[in-house]
Amino acid sequence: MAKIFYSMSGEGRGHAARVRTMTEHLRHEHELVLFAPNEAYDFLAPIYNTPDVPGVEVRKLPGLKFYYTKRRLDLSKSIYQGLKFLGQLNKNIRETTEILKSEKPDLIVSDFEPILPKAGRKCDIPVVSLNHQDFLLAYDLSSLPASLQWYAWAMGFVVKAHHVEKQATVVSSFFTPKLRPGYNDVVQVGPLLRPDVCQARPSEEGFILSYVRKATTDDTLQLLKSCDRPVKVYGLGKRPDDGPLTFHEIDEQRFTDDFIHCDALIGAAGNQSLGEAIYLGKPVLALPESSHHEQMINSHFLKEMGVGSWTAIETFAKSNLVSFLDGLSKFRENLAQYRGQTNGNPPALAAIRKHLPSTTLV
């Protein structure tokens, strides 16, 4: 049995969902300590900091966070707070280094989180990077519009700032274009899927699933009311029903069941939710914020694959919704080649196990 320290970013559910997937596969073989900031900690701590799940502990770690003003992503505030975080980075690394010296983990895995891997290298502990964001450096993005190519180039410096010398870089993504020169050692895997998703038998039961951010406007909800079938909305908490809209608290099992049996997904364009939708054969209408460039990139690849459509949430109109609903049959035809075929779990786990001490390999 090895001791694995595993850190992640804390914005949205994608990082925490990927980490939980790997944790569920590894926790029966190894001891895990998860380092999670912000929303990731709030999601994982109630699951694992309990006597019912031995061998896993979740600890809080400082992390970057998106900030919103009047329900819109506030880039200025987000960047300012990000600079404050970077100003504390060396202090946080020193403190974490002392923890590593004391507890001596065998391996560090990081999902786009800088503190733990940088501390790990100071202690000569092997590091595996398993995330989505490294696609900004490693993937050929020449099919994107020039503005998004420029963003990928600029954000590449942020991604590099997270880097340390490591044993492996694994990129989990629902899209897999060719690798750029110089990145041939990067391991490309599909989405990391929760057990309930892997084992699902999807069906269409006559409703739309909508997963949206807390900052979603009333105008967007009014448009969703014009769907030709019921819409189950997650992400806004419990509210009274509003015509065809029903609002649900985030409950993982109920959300997964609705995901498996919905007709289509409408909402945010995170890599994790899009990857799960494609695996399940669910068409997607992606609604990225125009200032959330990573989700804009995800949306472009979604459309390029022919498995959904997208529009920036600020310009979402009834015509976008009608066009998407009219195209469901065609999207499902295109999804047939991906449905049930894009599970990234086995190669991702192999990449982690490859770098565990030989006496702990299973």
Image: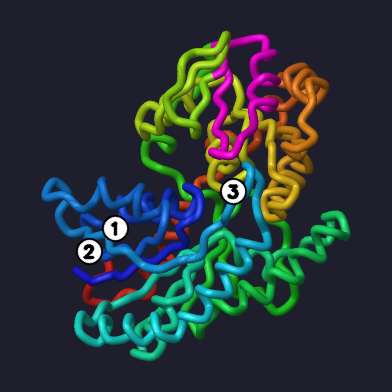
Give yes or no for residue 271 being in the magenta stretch.
Answer: no
The tag on residue 245 is: none
- Residue at image mark 1: 26
Q: Residue furthest right?
A: 146
Considering only vertical position in the picture, is 359 above or below 42?
Answer: below
Q: Residue placed at 68% from the left, 65% from the top?
A: 136
- Per the rendered image, the range of residues in magenta is 206-231
Q: In terms of secondary structure, where does tag 1 sit?
A: helix
How far separated are the C-alphas under marks 1 and 2? 6 Å
The amino acid on which the numbered mark 3 sits, given as a three-letter code, is Asn
Q: Describe residue 265's horizontal placement relative to residue 165 as left or right.
A: right
Q: Position of residue 194 (x, y in %)?
A: 40, 42
Report which quarter residue 161 is drawn in: bottom right
The amino acid on which the numbered mark 1 sits, given as a three-letter code, is Leu
Mark 3 touching mark 2, by CB under 8 A? no
Q: In terms of secondary structure, where does tag 3 sit?
A: helix
Density class for disc 1 (Cα within 10 Å; few <14, some 14-19, many ≥20) is some
